[in-house]
Amino acid sequence: MAHFAHARVDLDALTSNARLLREHAGGTPLMGVVKADGYGHGMLPAARALIAGGASWLGTALIGEALQLRRAGITVPVLAWIIPPGEPVGEAVGADIDLGVSDRAVLDEVVSEARRLGRTARVQLKIDTGLNRGGVSAADWAELTEAAARAEDDGHLRVSGIWSHFACADEPGHPSIGLQLSNFHEALEIADKVGLAPEVRHIANSAALLTLPETRFDLVRGGIASYGLSPIPDFSLPGLRPAMTLRSRVALTKRVGAGSGVSYGHRYVTDRETTLALVPLGYADGVPRAATNKGPVLLGDRVRTIAGTVCMDQFVLDVGDDRVEAGEYAVLFGDPGETPGVPTAQDWAAVLDTIPYEIVTRVGARVPREYVGAGS
Ligand SMILES: Cc1ncc(COP(=O)(O)O)c(C=O)c1O
């Protein structure tokens, strides 16, 4: 494992973000979404830090992730929502994990596992209100809710939640938002008619939590915003703090003459005699190869652009005549509130035509996470 590079994760930032999001949502309970290794920040430390800030639920994509939280002794309610065939549904029921159910076959499997174990499974029925991804289609909603109500009567099921997910909440004013919300209200009415009384109804992700108060219901699911990043490029909530800083020490510097081709393919050529600085992070560490001649990196007192091709383990910066020495830190992204001028994950997303989610979740396993803050 590298010791010269790390993704530094500020746990206090996570805790304070959770607190801020709860406040912003008028006290609506917050689910900290910690799937994908806590968006690359480390699932367990992130979960604990978000709970410390008032997150009373956790959300994961996979049952395996939810089980990891339970094995670590985390007892808050956890919802896991992607359940392909062959997943350990029985183990999840035994570990008191809420299961996001998007179709009848999964509902039947959950009920049969609950019966086998002599337990009451907690299920959150997901309605597809227009994302056309997970969730049961509106046409099958009545049948699913009726089947769930019957299983509740038998004592093997508790419908703890009804929920959905937005397609375009990160595009304020998008016409699909109102439509999805009205479909959600309709689905809730149908569920109510068959006698379901869920503890939580929820549809808001970070974007909705931040900008659409009418979508809060009983719970808001804060993913990217919990990590201090905005899902909407030109919107930010004052006080949110990016929790991850990705940095590496410079491995070596060298002087080269004018006209020197740099890195594979010589896609960058020096226009004068200059100093090159080698930064030992590459695409195997999550620095996209597409950042070739594009990625912004703070080194010394200036943001520089990656010179030439990003390799598997390294890239190069052209620092001109600035004094830069091996051992100095080059910072790819971080929190400008802490390090003025540092690029953000959003800056990386902008130059790569992607979203900050992809920038933080792709930081590779070879890059150690270094935790700072109260919970570290
Ligand atoms: C179903 C579901 N809910 C909530 C979230 C959290 O979204 P965000 O990170 O935009 O808050 C995700 C993330 O992809 C998701 O898939």
Image (cartoon, rainbow, N blue to C red):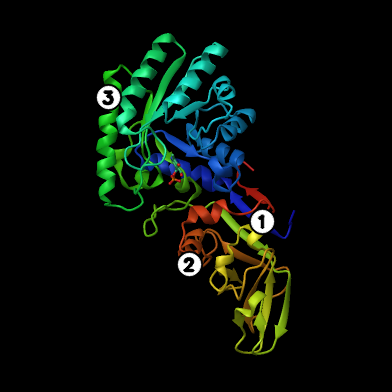
Q: CA gap, disc 1 to disc 2?
A: 22 Å
Q: CA gap, disc 2 to disc 3?
A: 45 Å
Label 2 sits on residue: 351
**Which amino acid type corresponds to the residue marked 1 in the rendered image?**
His
What residue is drawn where x is 46% and y is 56%? Answer: 355
What residue is drawn where x is 46% and y is 20%? Answer: 108
What residue is drawn where x is 61% and y is 58%? Answer: 286
Label 3 sits on residue: 190
Label 1 sits on residue: 6
**Which amino acid type corresponds to the residue marked 2 in the rendered image?**
Val
Instruction: Please tell me whether residue 276 is drawn above or below residue 245 in the rendered image.
Output: below
Label 1 or label 2, whichever comes before in sequence order: 1
Is label 3 in a helix, a strand or a loop? helix
Q: Quadrant of residue 47?
A: top right
Residue 197 visible at all: no
Do the residues bearing badges 1 and 3 touch, measured as CB atoms within 8 Å?
no
Label 1 or label 3, whichever comes before in sequence order: 1
Instruction: Please tell me whether residue 357 is drawn above or below residue 47 in the rendered image.
Output: below
Residue 58 visible at all: yes
Crowding at dot 1, Cα within 10 Å, few <14 / some 14-19 / many 20+, comes out as many
Does residue 358 appear left or right of residue 184 in this picture?
right
Do the residues bearing badges 1 and 2 touch, measured as CB atoms within 8 Å?
no
Instruction: Please tell me whether residue 66 is drawn above or below residue 90 in the rendered image.
Output: below
Whole-percent x, y for residue 238 in the image: 40, 53
Indicate if the residue with disc 2 has its beta carbon within 8 Å of ligand 1: no
Quadrant for ligand 1 reads top left
Is label 2 in a helix, a strand or a loop? helix
